[in-house]
Amino acid sequence: MLEPTGVLPQQAWRLSTETRSWPDEVLVDVEVLNLDAASYRQLREQHGDPDAVRRAVLDIITERGKLHNPVTGSGGMLLGAVREVGPESPLGLRPGDRIATLVSLTLTPLRIDDGLARWSGASEQIPCRGTAVLFGRSIAAVLPDDLPDELALSVLDVCGAPALTDRVVREAGTGDQGGPSVLVLGGGGKSGSLSLAAARRAGAGRLVALVPTRAEADAVRAAGLADEVVLADARDPVAVAAAVGARADVTVVCVDVPGCEHGAILATVDGGTIVFFSMATSFSAAALGAEGLAADVRMLIGNGYVPGHATFALDLLRSTPGVRDLFERRERQTSPT
Amino acid sequence: MLEPTGVLPQQAWRLSTETRSWPDEVLVDVEVLNLDAASYRQLREQHGDPDAVRRAVLDIITERGKLHNPVTGSGGMLLGAVREVGPESPLGLRPGDRIATLVSLTLTPLRIDDGLARWSGASEQIPCRGTAVLFGRSIAAVLPDDLPDELALSVLDVCGAPALTDRVVREAGTGDQGGPSVLVLGGGGKSGSLSLAAARRAGAGRLVALVPTRAEADAVRAAGLADEVVLADARDPVAVAAAVGARADVTVVCVDVPGCEHGAILATVDGGTIVFFSMATSFSAAALGAEGLAADVRMLIGNGYVPGHATFALDLLRSTPGVRDLFERRERQTSPT
């Protein structure tokens, strides 16, 4: 990495994108980049029209040597084919393997060779040609044969959320009658719908999805992912608390807009747990909000890595038709026309 | 609150500071404001000389109706005397009580009447005259008789840290031989030294303090708060990992500068827990850093509220002479000369 020296790649402002790899590195021919939802939303809001979004993404990659949104601090992931494997790489990959990276693009050296010419700027998935480098400590999943690439990529992008939700719900469940109640803010999105499915499988009791629109509520209901689907703006704490009613033992925040911390806190019982997966989460808003409300809640930073998370998420998608329906519905909506 | 409507006070840009209180509110005559460490450091770095810091703090309070640093998102707390108690206030306070607020100044309506004329800008504690409003859901502690005000205020400012450290170390300790190993980054500071004392009392095994300077290392050693005191810049992940050696079961981050997330992650065992108390913590740096390092660590947002935290912290200070020594040493260093 280049600037500043002595920090790890995610902290670095700019990465070196030399394509001669170290012995433990893997070179990847990039096929698709997948922007994380918070980053894509921020770029769209800042730049407006799709063409400006496209230029902004290209500028970020050119300037920083990685796709690292300077405002949200987040990146996304990529899909590609392994070109070269260093002799000391521990990742178990072979040239030709088609893979998705499971570490953030914020720490993946990346060079784009086609100016993102094939991308309209109107979707989170960016078809492109370029080169990326995986480090020894990276993680990548070989793409499954039985799912379309875009679908697999969408699932792998958020696969940390269902795996950690599974763990937290199981921990909260010990000794409870009927399992802990679970609330998912943003239950209609990618990480949200997978988290609902994971919570149900982990033995959740009352399972509530909160969504922002009637259309999304209908879709989540049709998918059968929750016991109750409620409508509210997740940024309005009072509205969230009113919509949810009885507070949840576990609240999972999957809304990709800023300002959802206090609603999550108000909607969670004392002694309960909140898991923040949204990259739009503010550390200080969460810490000081809980303090200010005298709320004795355990608040977890949603770590995107849990051992086995890729397999777990893909399996949830395969075994929960409702989740797959929501993913495919979402793809149809965000695909360029 | 004024702007925008429909959010809770901490999220609001600006609070109303009308001094006619609601039935469940308490009016307080302010004597001292205590800036949180991250905020004071940021203001000093941005504005340089103490007089400019003083003006910046006054401008924030005048503009926002509260002491809410727009860069760090944090505030601090205050010491004052209760002037008026609304008939429906649940806080159990009486007019004349001398109190410290235990909710952040980021959600406390505040008006300053003396232009901060008695403060030099060169310390975190700001003697002043003004009025603050406590809401029904606030928390305030009546000041103890046996400790100087400034000392009590300093302890109460960070009292969430030792209480949550106590809980986390006890949870981590079940079934372990000799107790979980605990690392405190910034072990020489206020929250750091209290967290060390709390960890020891909670049954920590190997207890390591990491500090940035030789002088601070000597002070922590003299105070007898840790089994090992190591020197490193907490922002340098590789240096942190090297200095700490064997990774910790529990890592407590009390360093008030940005960029300490990755060092904490590298220094913690898989399956271990990190508690971030520093308001300078970046949510995305922590989440994506752990993912990028494939580190299966549980990361907690340090909630400033734990039931009984004020009494617990004051008691730790009274019963641990080394902690009191460090607090008093720190006061001597930061007091205006």
Image (cartoon, coloured by chain):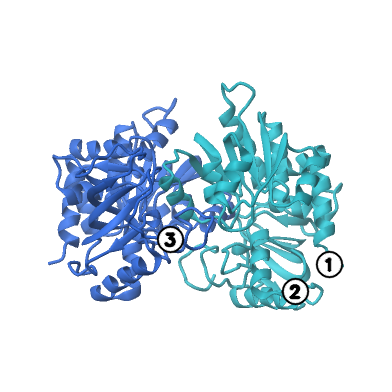
Chain colours: A cyan, B blue
Instruction: Say left or right for B155 vs A103.
Output: left
Quadrant housing residue B182: top left
Among the two numbered marks 1 and 2 on one chain, the one whose residue lies closer to the N terminus: 2
Q: Viewer-proximal residue, A77 or A219? A: A219
Mark 3: which secondary structure?
A: loop
Q: What residue is drawn where x is 56% and y is 30%?
A: A172
Q: Amino acid at mark 1?
A: Pro
Mark 2: which secondary structure?
A: helix
Q: Amino acid at mark 2?
A: Pro
Check chain identity for marks 1 and 3: say if they share one: no
Looking at the picture, how far across and down is residue A286, in whole percent?
48, 50
Q: Is B307 located above or below residue A237 in the figure?
A: above
Looking at the picture, how far across and down is residue B235, in whole percent?
41, 61
Quadrant housing residue A164: top right
| Residue at mark 1 to residue at mark 2: CA–CA distance | 10 Å
- Mark carried by residue A154: none
Mark 1: which secondary structure?
A: loop
Q: Are marks 1 and 2 in contact (CB under 8 Å)?
A: no
Kindly identify which chain the residue marked by label 2 belongs to. Answer: A
| Residue at mark 1 to residue at mark 3: CA–CA distance | 38 Å
Q: What residue is drawn where x is 42% and y is 36%?
A: B168
**Residue under numbered circle 2:** A50
Q: Amino acid at mark 3?
A: Gly
| Residue at mark 3 to residue at mark 2: CA–CA distance | 32 Å
Q: Viewer-proximal residue, B241 or A267? A: A267
**Residue under numbered circle 3:** B73
Kindly identify which chain the residue marked by label 1 belongs to. Answer: A
Q: Are marks 1 and 3 in contact (CB under 8 Å)?
A: no
Q: Quarter of the image for the N terminus of chain A: give it.
A: bottom right
Looking at the picture, how far across and down is residue B316, in whole percent?
24, 37
